[in-house]
Image (spheres, rainbow, N blue to C red):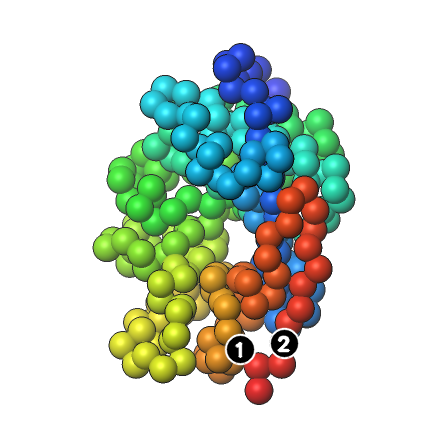
């Protein structure tokens, strides 16, 4: 596909030297190995994400969005990530599909990072703005071999409607539903329903923001095995952090 798209570079005012990435693992409690690493944007000296994001807005956001994925792939290849790689994706910013798609493919090819190991993350709120446009943009990436995750699922109001119209490969449960779930009956009922829908649709289910063994134990009893959160590992700047999977019992 990279042969059929025009080569498009980000504008000069979006410099890859202005930012870098920290990485946090998504762990598989069955295999006790890292399934993927999410790339989290940081300043060049590990400044928090908001300090980077505030420099880009409006018509600069699409170019920044594309430049982020290209830089994340470069850093991931440099530090030797051999798992999947989760990259944030802003459908509302990527109106020019060629810019984002081509820069991602070029970066993956340049650093010998297989496209099949790239997972794009869009939040539920971003995804539901325009279902038709969202599907059109994402399907271009899927045709290139990449997969899609819906992040912060359950934080918005149209999540199940989104799943009925467009099925992602992965759903990442919003941490607001995770917090204290072992002692919160209404959240438990909601999460059980979401998890069953994912099973029925063949969607992988990731629980993010897990911070306590009690939360981990409840989801383990539900049959969940993909997790992300401080209980397992905190993000590490330009490195793969060591992780620990505790005994949930």
Question: Residue 91: x percent and y percent?
Answer: 38, 35
Side (left or right) of 182 relative to 29:
left
Dot label at residue 34? none
Answer few, some or many: residues within 10 Å of disc 2's Cα (few below 14, many 20 plus, some between 14 and 19). Answer: some
Dot label at residue 246? 2
Answer few, some or many: residues within 10 Å of disc 1's Cα (few below 14, many 20 plus, some between 14 and 19). Answer: some
Please indicate, yes or no, whether residue 124 appears anywhere in the rendered image: yes
Helix or strand or loop: what does disc 2 sit on? loop
Helix or strand or loop: what does disc 1 sit on? helix
**Front position in the image: 5 or 50:** 50
Residue 30, placed above or below residue 59:
below
Which of the 4 image quadrants contains residue 191? bottom left
Side (left or right) of 198 relative to 73:
left
**Front position in the image: 15 or 125:** 15
Side (left or right) of 108 relative to 58:
right
In the image, what residue occupies the spot 71% across and 27% down? Answer: 110
Q: Residue furthest left?
A: 157
Q: Which residue is mark 1?
A: 213
């Amino acid at each position: 596909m990279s042969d059929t798209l025009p080569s498009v570079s980000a504008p000069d005012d979006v410099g890859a030297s202005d930012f870098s990435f920290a990485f946090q693992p998504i762990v598989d409690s069955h295999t006790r190995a890292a399934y993927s690493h999410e790339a989290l944007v940081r300043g060049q000296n590990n400044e928090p994400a908001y300090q980077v994001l505030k420099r880009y807005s409006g018509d600069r956001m699409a170019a920044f969005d594309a430049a982020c994925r290209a830089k994340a792939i470069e850093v991931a290849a440099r530090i030797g990530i051999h798992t999947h790689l989760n990259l944030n994706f802003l459908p509302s910013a990527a109106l020019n599909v060629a810019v984002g798609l081509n820069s991602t493919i070029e970066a993956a090819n340049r650093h010998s990072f297989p496209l099949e190991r790239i997972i794009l993350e869009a939040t539920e709120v971003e995804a539901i703005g325009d279902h038709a446009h969202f599907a059109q943009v994402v399907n271009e990436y899927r045709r290139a071999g990449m997969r899609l995750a819906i992040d912060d699922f359950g934080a918005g109001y149209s999540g199940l409607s989104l799943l009925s119209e467009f099925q992602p490969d992965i759903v990442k449960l919003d941490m607001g539903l995770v917090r204290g779930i072992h002692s919160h009956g209404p959240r438990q009922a909601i999460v059980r329903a979401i998890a069953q829908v994912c099973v029925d649709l063949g969607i992988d289910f990731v629980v993010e923001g897990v911070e306590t063994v009690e939360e981990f134990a409840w989801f383990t009893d539900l049959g969940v095995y993909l997790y992300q959160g401080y209980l397992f590992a905190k993000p590490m700047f330009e490195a793969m952090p060591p992780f620990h999977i505790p005994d949930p019992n």
